[in-house]
Image (cartoon, grey):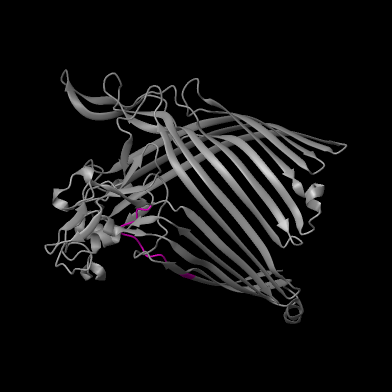
Amino acid sequence: GSATTFRHVNTTQLGRSGEAARTTSADLDQILEATGTYSNSFGGHSINLLGGYGYQDFINESFQASNFQFPTDLFGFDRLQSGTALTDGKASMSSDKSSYKLIGFFSRVNYDWNNRFLLMASVRKEGNSRFGAGNKWGMFPAVSAAWRLSEEGFIRRFPVVNDLKLRLGYGVTGIAPNDSYLSLTSYTYGQRFLYNGQWVQGLAPNRNPNPDLRWEQKDEINTGIDFSMFNSRLNGAVDVYRRDTKNMLYNFSVPVPPYLFNNMLANVGHMQNDGVEAQLSYDAFRGSRVRWTTSANWSTNRNKLVSLSDATFRPQSDFFFAGGTGEPIQQSTHRVDIGGPIGNFYGFKSVDIDANGEWIVLDKNNLPIPIRRVTQDDRHVLGNGLPKQYAAWNNNVRAGNFDLDANLRGAFKFQILNFQRMYYENPKIVQYNMLRSAFDSVYGKRPVSYDLAYVSYYVEDGDYVKLDNVTLGYTVDARLLSRMTNALSSARVYVSGRNLATITGYKGMDPEVSTTGLTPGNDNRDQYPTTRMFTAGMTISF
């Protein structure tokens, strides 16, 4: 529950005389899983079989009620009926219930021949009540194989190689929507209307039925290599993959009639991701008193929206817009092209500003024009909000009784739309907050004012490196601890710092902005600064 007193801003500004609400939610998740295994070895062969059945029945229920205009704030949310907003018809109340069921049959076989050739194959047949009639079940196979080259004679000639393994795998996984009942017609109660002298509650459809609603499907092929060298001091892995996500859900605009509602959810999308992932770890020191282990990982990814149509549904255009700047600029921030990548910023490419504070931008023919003369066709791709590369470097040092952990990570080759600069770096709009940089030169000029606009001047490179976590600890020597007390078997004290430093050229608060969905790289206009946190503590064992 939650409640505000008479001294709250809602009372002083809105005259609400206190607000109170009670909310409750309950989840019931019934799960049954049964498995059976069989293992056997003969000669150089080893085999392991697994089979099973899984069942899940999930139910969620929630209830909420709120009221305001209370005669006293003594009761908080424990006497909701006292508020007069209830009798005035202004209080709110809602309840909800949803459920879904999952049933799965699965099996897996692992095969090993002389620790040289490894094979794994699995299949899962899974049904989900959230899909349309006749499409509730999906079949998801997977197979992978590995060849341990380090067991072969031509590799054993090199004693520096301790382990070397090649891998190849292919698998299919199913993805279900987060909401139930999407395949069914749904209705909503609308305005009341007078019929034969009586007020009747209106009822109108707000979702089309789609009995063809089915599993989204992710197909992935992966090839990789694992290695260990120099008495297992150097270890690493490299993976190259392609992921094809098919039957992705997308909402189409459809005509009414023949449809009941103006949009339709259908499995039409096809997204492709290609990437490389690499990991490396090294024991730099292996002494009895000093040990230093360092590891790094790096990844890169390229995505493409391959298709957004099927035999029934086809978009009206080969691109669509996503995201928004908000008022008063009122522009979409991204454009998604079918056959192109997710995350492209799409707006006006600024090149100058005149003495009157008007942006000079490039038109569709790359000729400079005042922004007041542009059309929507004059927009350009201004960058991409998805990092093309990620990297991290982790270190663990132990020297005597001291231990030190330090972690760095970063993202590279991407852009950010700086919403704070776009709205607050302007000396003309006095109703907003204002940054000190509002009076800086723009393209080498110092204008008195200029208009708010979504232009490339506010799209910045977002590359960053963060010193994310550092922990220094000291483990009390066991002999010293025994002299101090016999009650403790071990004790360690530590100090830790998080978000200690960020190296970046980005001018906003934090370059680590959202990179999910169709609008990656959009910074928040209003946000709390990222906090630096320090912790000191002790762990003891009795």
Answer with left or right where residue 428 lies relative to residue 387. left
Q: Does the magenta run of residues contain 528?
A: yes
Q: Nearer the viewer, residue 232 or 142?
A: 232
Residue shown at the point (19%, 57%) measured from the top left? 452
Answer with left or right where residue 511 lies relative to residue 322. right
Q: Does the magenta run of residues contain 78?
A: no
Residue shown at the point (63%, 68%) measured from the top left? 396
Q: Is residue 361 depicted above or below 96 in this figure? A: below
Q: Quadrant of the C terminus?
A: bottom right
Q: Position of residue 433 (x, y in %)?
A: 23, 65
Q: Is residue 74 depicted above or below 187 in this figure? A: below
| Magenta residues (range) | 521-533
Q: Is residue 94 depicted above or below 482 in this figure? A: above
Secondary structure, magenta segment, majority class: loop
Q: Position of residue 157 (x, y in %)?
A: 81, 54
Q: How many marks?
A: 0
Image quadrant in which you'd find residue 86? top left
